[in-house]
Image (cartoon, rainbow, N blue to C red):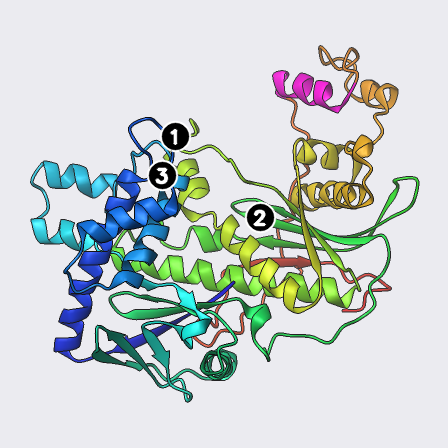
Amino acid sequence: MQTISVPYTTDEDSRAAITRLRRIQSAAVRTAYANAVGPDGKRLKQKDLRDLVKAHFAGHEADAWLLHTATLEGIACRERVPDGSMVFGGKCLARRRAKGLIPAQRWKNARLRPLNSAGDKTRLGNRHFRLAEDAETCALTVYGARYTLVLADMRGKHHAILQQIARDAALGLINVQFSLGDHRLNITIDETKLTAHPDRRSPQTFAKNRVLAVDMNPNWVGVSVVDMGDDGGVTVKDWRLFDLTGLNTGTRQDRSQKAAADQANKITTEVAEIAESIANLARSWNAGLIGLENLRGMPRGDLGRGANHNRLVLNLWTRQHLTACLKRHARQRGVEVLEVNAAYSSTIGNLLHEFPDAVAASIEIGRRTLEVRRGRQDRFYPVYSGDALAQRWKHVPGVVEAGDWVGLHGALKRANVRVRRPHPVAPSAAFEVRAHMSRTSRVSQWRVACANSPA
């Protein structure tokens, strides 16, 4: 899925009406979330929950489709936080409001969600929103009341995509989801359904047994292009290393709300650029497969390593954004993306390959990806050469007795033995950002120009 966010303006009367619609739908989302699970602990059927929400908000300005969208959103929220403890508006502000530290209006505004309308290609893409063919305006219609949104002047690729969305929606070819906030209109589509897309590439023949693998960390992204023979041996064709440290520490001295928003926008922009560069690297090396580590189910809450580590991992690490952007660009280039279990990949990669930490881990992820693709689950871990590894750390308790990679990892960790190889200090090339609003990059890049490199 691809989302394009466009700033908009409208008159005061329209803005007041949109705010009322947002308040009703926000309340409907909270109702759907609270009632998604019955007293017996069983989930309600979508139809029953939708009927409950519609009955509760009957007679308001929001129509049935907006309430249907709110029901879907409430169900999605309940799936993310199934115990019903989600606080709409945020726990921090809820505590401040309970102590009387913020006014009631600020708390109400914090609970105000964007106005969402699910796509419906049988109704010209969406039942409420109509994007003009020139992509300069968008009309919102609810119960016959029409509100005009004047969109910002978009240029380049995004303007071409918006125009194509308007044309395909008018023909009933695609579903278009709209999300209307305070100042921006978000338009989401399945980019593979568009009849034309500026990122779409012509088909090509990919190399057999070749994968581009990615290891993601909060401050580092390691990339490697790996070939694997039938015996499981790997050959590294090329690698990249992206340093995001400067990006993540951009506002350490400035704690203002504007600085935090600017940093979030900067991170989003540059991570998207990194994802596109990785997809282009895969295509340039004729790699028809990208291997990613499956990071679902990561722990939440305090990680026990200090506030800075919690902020880095829980707040600043945009792993889902990088994964989503990479999958989207890969689809447009005809490249398959496969996620694999990354357990012990850092330890194994650093022990077997003399590359920087994140790159070494990515090599092991690439090997696993090809083995999983071949259906050889018995080769998920590489062959364990216990004698050679025991000689390296024979003085470490438990290493000699370790019979596999899991046992070796545990022995080294209990002994506090560091196996991660250091990352280089000086970048070999600057990372170029093409976005016109973000010319100066805070990302450093290490790049290896191999003799047979296509780049």
**In front here: 391 or 137?**
137
Provide the residue span drawn in magenta: 404-416
Whether residue 134 is situated above or below residue 340 in the rendered picture: below
C-alpha span from label 1 to label 3: 32 Å
Mark pair 2, 3: CA separation: 43 Å
Q: Quadrant of the C terminus?
A: bottom right
Report the disc number at residue 103: none
* Whole-percent x, y for residue 202 in the image: 73, 76
The mark found on residue 302 in the picture is 1
- SS for dot 2: strand
Q: Nearer the viewer, residue 41 or 298?
A: 41
- In-image side of 405 versus 427 (left or right): right
Membership of 361 in magenta stretch: no
Label 3: state its secondary structure: loop
Query: Mark 1 or 2, which is nearer the eye?
Result: 1
User: Of label 2 and label 3, which has the lower sequence position?
Assistant: 3
Question: Distance from label 1 to label 2 (Cα)?
Answer: 22 Å
Which of the 4 quarters of the picture holds residue 237? bottom right
Between 304 and 232, the residue placed more toward the observer is 232
- Asked if the residue at tag 3 contacts the one at tag 1, i.e. Cβ–Cβ closer than 8 Å, the answer is no
Q: Given the image, on which type of amino acid does mark 1 rest?
A: Asp
Residue 91 visible in the picture: yes
Mark 1 surroundings: few (<14), some (14-19) or many (≥20) residues within 10 A: few
Of callouts 1 and 3, the N-terminal one? 3
Viewed as shown, does residue 274 lie left or right of 99?
right
Q: Which residue is pictured at 64% across the width and 69% down the height?
A: 332
From what the image shows, is residue 134 above or below residue 241? below
User: Which residue is the site of mark 3?
Assistant: 44
**Residue for point 51% across, 82% down:** 164
10 Å crowding of disc 2: few (<14), some (14-19), many (20+): many
The residue singled out by tag 2 in the image is 220
